Image: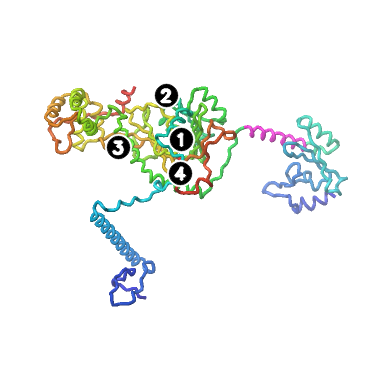
Amino acid sequence: SPQVVWGMLGNRQFCSYKMTTKTQNFCRNEYNLTGLCNRSSCPLSNSQYATVREEKGRCYLYMKTIERAAFPRRLWERVLLSKNYEKALEEIDENLIYWPRFIRHKCKQRFTKITQYLIRIRKLTLKRQRKLVPLRRKIERRENRREEKALIAAQLDNAIEKELLERLKQDTYGDIYNFPIHAFDKALQQQDAESESESEREEDDDDEDVDKREFVEAEDSELSDFEDMDKLETSSEEEQEEEEEVEKKASHSKSKGKTPLKGPARRKRPYIEIEYEEETEPSTKTKAA
Amino acid sequence: PGHGNGPMPGDGTGSAAPERVLFPPTFSVSEIKNKQRRHFMFLRWKQQQRKEKLALKKKRRKEREALGDKAPPKAVPKTIENQRVYDETTVDPNDEEVAFDEATDEFAPYFNRQTVPKILITTSDRPRGRTVRFCEQLATVIPNSHVYYRRGLALKRIIPQCIARDFTDLIVINEDRKIPNGLVLSHLPDGPTAHFRMSSVRLRKEIKRKGKEPTEHVPEVILNNFTTRLGHSIGRMFAALFPHDPQFIGRQVATFHNQRDYIFFRFHRYIFKSEKKVGIQELGPRFTLKLRSLQKGTFDSKFGEYEWIHKRREMDTSRRKFHL
């Protein structure tokens, strides 16, 4: 009889479905209505019992009666509930008519909860789901190691500098940077066209002054980049030295095009070194704008 | 124990007197129990090795000089790049087919200067601080780019909206455990989508000796080492992010350097100190990418047509084989 069963299972904790925690006892039985281990919710110790369970999105009402207690295979009777919420509630009611109030109430509660979580499942599957991709440790380590080695092999700074110098050589920057050696090389290639070079010299006076000024200062080799850039930007400001430099240029015998000041031909002549301390960035910004 | 304090016999490299028939037993340095003495012996051994090596080098150099012009050419050391398995899809600069392909592919309007790149940068759901800051810095590096937060929107729905608003590229930075670890780069009007694995992300404040902030000037672009056909298309994808005409006044350069299938991104400011010297200063964030897959259309994980997927078992078998 059910009382004896309960005496064994519930009170004396012989039930294998029972899980005890500090405050509560739970029942792991799949046919349990509430999930707690109580006299009224234990499916084993109640001869008349009912539950609602769902399978693959459809809800079923399971019922157990005393008459079938001897036939375990036919013990639980299954009734498919309709998909319509209200209709299903009515079905539960008509199936469990004359059953104890507790079981009826709990069945309907459980059914409500199940339908709610089914709705939620359906909504979530429509949204994006985060896919967890497991990392493989060996592969991660291998990739990291290879990346480090590749970084060392890449020698990025050198590669970038080389590329920039290449672009400078190929004149992608046009007239912004005028370095005399570069110009000298170009002029060397045009050795025959001396007349051209002379006209160039006259036309590009200003540029050459810039070159000259720049190159000689690089000779001093104690100046910062800043000043070089200053010279580039503020080329117009040092007009005073133009004439002197033109004279010096004329004195060079083998001047082809833009004169080189290479090797022994270099001469440190006294000149005024005017330092312009300027922020290049604002100036470039205004120029760009 | 025969370990004396006097001059120890070496490892049998000929220091014994010719009368003795048997060489004294060689003491390996590691058998000495006393740590100090062992250390001392080891240092001595090391010095000896170095001396021998130096002597050998000198001898070889002398021989080489003695031969003069007839000397055999210097041996080039083998590197992984030297030994790389030849990829048949390597692009020859004069290849007409490739040139024709490139003239008619999805980037043609960009390279014909018909479109101006406009880029949308976004993240995966709920980005953490680091990712957000990285996105902002990336937006300063790439001109004409906007950062938008993704509030649970599906990519497939974002894309038509982007196209409607004239965006040319979409960058999605995927985040995991508070660090960005993936990048999806999609060229918008129907363009290819590339999925990268991102690593070694350094924000501006973590870079040592960095300069001031990147300015608004359009940077130049350097693409290094994209040799194969696949590499070429990826390189073009990167190039399409930046406007065509760099402002040289800004002196900024963005570099995508491919080495052994890893693409290193750096952002520098350069200055020409002289004809042969240039100085660079790193601004901007840096990261490395590794290509995982390239899809033909826009981002579509289910029905997309993949041009290339990294298949670990097939492609990672050889250490000398690279695909980009």
Mark 2 on the same chain as mark 4: yes
Q: Secondary structure at mark 2?
A: loop
Per the image, the residue denoted by label 2 is B113
Label pair 3/1, CB-CB below 8 angstroms: no
Circle 4: element type: loop
Q: CA distance from mark 3 to mark 1?
A: 28 Å
Label 4 belongs to which residue?
B322
Q: What is the three-letter code of the residue carrying label 1?
A: Ile
Q: CA distance from mark 3 to mark 4?
A: 31 Å
For this orientation, the residue located farthest to the right is: A67
Q: Is residue B101 left or right of residue A121?
A: left
Secondary structure beneath label 1: helix
Sequence order check: which comes first, mark 4 or mark 1?
A: 1
Q: Which label's residue is closer to the chain start, 2 or 4? A: 2
Q: Which residue, given by chain and number where applicable, does mark 1 sit on?
A: B234
> Residue B210 at what x, y percent from top left?
35, 37
Q: Residue at x 41, y 45 (%)?
A: A150
Q: Are the residues flagged by discs 4 and 1 from a single subunit?
A: yes
- Real-space Cα distance between discs 4 and 1? 14 Å
Sort mark 2 into few (<14), some (14-19) or many (20+) by Cα contacts within 10 Å.
few
Please say whether residue B293 is one of the residues in the magenta stretch: no
Q: Which residue is mark 3?
A: B279
